[in-house]
Image (cartoon, rainbow, N blue to C red):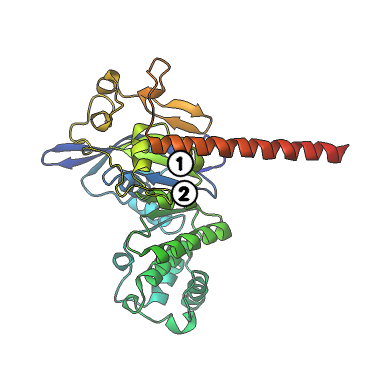
Amino acid sequence: MENKDDVLEVRNLKINFKTYAGDVKAIRDVSFDLKKGETLAIVGESGSGKTVTTRSIMGLLANNAVVAGGKIEFHDQNLLKLGRKQMDGIRGRDIAEIFQDPMTSLDPTMKICRQIAEPLIIHKGMKREKAMAQALEMMKLVGIEDAEHRINNYPHQFSGGMRQRIVIAIALVNRPEILIADEPTTALDVTIQAQILRLMKELQEKINTSIIFITHDLGVVAGMADRVAVMYAGKIVEYGTVDEIFYNPKHPYTWGLLSSMPTLDTKSETLPSIPGTPPDLLDPPKGDAFAARNKYALKIDTEKQPPFFKVSPTHYAATWLLDPKAPKVTPPEQIIERQKHFAQLTKKTQKQNLNKHINEQEEQL
């Protein structure tokens, strides 16, 4: 791997789906990395390629999917080159996933204790009694009340929030290096959603796992992620730290996503929305895929795909608006307010760092 801190590297990934109408170019040259102990959020509208990207990491692509290029490196192995048996050894042990609907993830005919213990028996060859004991401890860890008496219950005997805790217990029982969470709280109400997100952060700190968090809800990302990758039409169009994406976004698509997100300061009864629909990936646009929906689009957007422009050492965006020759445009009002807030935060941090440095110098004297 290029960076020792990286536990996963995805490079130039291209995935097509064969259909009667032709090849759907679902993932178009996607690259990112995941660092140890961090949470990387991948956000975007439905159909942007978020789930297909993570399914490729898990080796769970549909039969009509074709990997047209790229690599997914984990411990110096290209996961795309591994056979089914090798992936079975990694999936659930080193890389685990939490799916959106817990009822489709759990076996309704199997007791909860057995479902949590099964990964330990399969991947570690653990004896049944020991695996059951660890399953009980895991139930307690994820906050299942009265775990000793509920360990022999079936999934239908738990609420939706408790079922999702059980799914998290199954995913984390082997202490995986990477946890993929694909819209894990969408089916839950807001209160339970907050509890599950808090639980995931607490467990992440305890076992030092890295998380790839898939969502279309930017509000969830703010409290969960360290870094954010914004996807559109099978490509990553912007990535950076959570502060950079939320307070200083540069891509018009990110502007649209953030502007349509309600905040405590939202006064209007209606929220702005992104006009139009994503492009048909049977025949992707020649230029920027977002051009047809982008009121800030330049002529070059319809002719040539933009490269990534560097905003900071950690922040990149693929938009021609960042080209030195591009005309200056005024972002939406909501984004300007975010940028002002970010500038204030930056000034405050700089002042705190300066004061800290002065205090350290005085202590040395």
Mark 2 is surrounded, within 10 Å at the Cα level, by few (under 14), some (14 to 19) or many (20 or more) other residues, namely some
Kindly tell me whether residue 12 is visible in this rendering. no
Q: Position of residue 25 (x, y in %)?
A: 24, 36
**Residue 251 versus residue 51 in the image, above or below:** above
Q: CA distance from mark 2 to mark 1?
A: 8 Å
Locate the C terminus by quadrant.
top right
| Front one among 218 and 54 | 218
Residue 355 is drawn in which quadrant? top right
- Mark 2 touches mark 1? (CB < 8 Å): yes
**Which residue is label 2 attached to?**
222
Q: Position of residue 351 (x, y in %)?
A: 67, 36
Three-letter code for the amino acid on which mark 2 is drawn: Ala
Q: Earlier in the sequence, mark 2 or mark 1?
A: 2
Q: Is residue 229 left or right of residue 358?
A: left
**Residue 135 versus residue 361 in the image, above or below:** below
Q: Position of residue 93 (x, y in %)?
A: 45, 58
Q: Position of residue 79 (x, y in %)?
A: 39, 44
Residue at image point 46% right, 59% down: 197
Three-letter code for the amino acid on which mark 1 is drawn: Phe
Q: Tell me the SS state at disc 1.
A: helix
Residue at image point 18% right, 35% down: 282
Q: Is residue 299 left or right of residue 160?
A: left
Residue reaching furthest to the bottom? 149
Residue 69 is drawn in which quadrant? top left
**Which residue is label 1 attached to?**
246
Mark 1 is surrounded, within 10 Å at the Cα level, by few (under 14), some (14 to 19) or many (20 or more) other residues, namely many
Residue reaching furthest to the left? 20
Kindly tell me whether residue 251 is visible in this rendering. yes
